[in-house]
Amino acid sequence: MSTLAVLRDFKTNMIAFLDELIEQFPEEAPFVIARIFIKDRIPAETVMTNFIREVMPYKQYIIRRDDTFFLNHDLPGVTQHDQGATLSHLRTIWRSSRLDTEDKEIIWQWISLFIKLAEKYQIILRSST
């Protein structure tokens, strides 16, 4: 698998994840904005790089399903300077009573998938140098 294929999978899955969030929370404009930016405005490599830099250091929180991750950290999606289209709004939703245990587990599964794709991307990058 090439880095381009992993980036394509990452972007496709990130959009699918956002689509699920939008379906569940249609009134939450930040998810729609993040989807637009990730789909049409921000290169997949930028989204991946931001994810690696800002989420991968917390991989153990994700593996352990430690809520501290969502309570204290943001999912970058895109950077702050890209007109604020981050996934930080997920923290607000996580803190509310709007997600049940099953909803949270599904989100953990999505983030775990993104971790696996990011790891695969890093392995391919290292092996090509």
Image: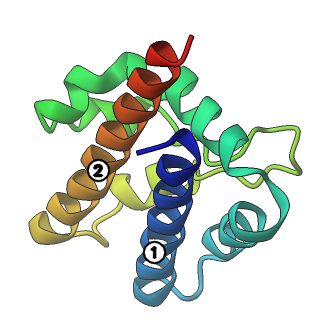
User: Which label number is shown at residue 16?
Assistant: 1
Q: Quadrant of the C terminus?
A: top right
Callout 2: helix, strand or loop? helix
Q: Is residue 44 above or below residue 99?
A: above
Q: Position of residue 24 (x, y in %)?
A: 40, 85
**In the depicted structure, whether residue 123 falls above or below residue 34:** above
Question: Of 30 and 119, which appears nearest the observer?
Answer: 119
Instruction: Residue type at mark 1: give it.
Output: Ala
Q: Residue at x 44, y 27 (%)?
A: 124
Q: Quadrant of residue 115?
A: top left
Which residue is depicted at the point 37% across and 43% down? Answer: 117
Q: Which callout, 2 or 1, points at the residue further toward the start of the chain?
A: 1
| Relative to 123, 39 lies left or right | right
| Amino acid at circle 2 | Leu
Horizontal and vertical percent position of residue 67: 23, 38
How far apart are the alpha carbons under marks 2 and 1? Answer: 12 Å
Q: As drawn, is 43 to the left or to the right of 27? A: right
Q: Quadrant of the N terminus?
A: top left
Residue position for label 2: 113
Q: Residue at x 49, y 80 (%)?
A: 19
Position of residue 28 relative to residue 47, above or below, is below
Residue at the location (42% across, 29% down)?
A: 72
On screen, residue 114 versus residue 84, left or right, reads: left
SS of the residue under disc 1: helix
Residue 112 on image: x %, y %:
25, 45
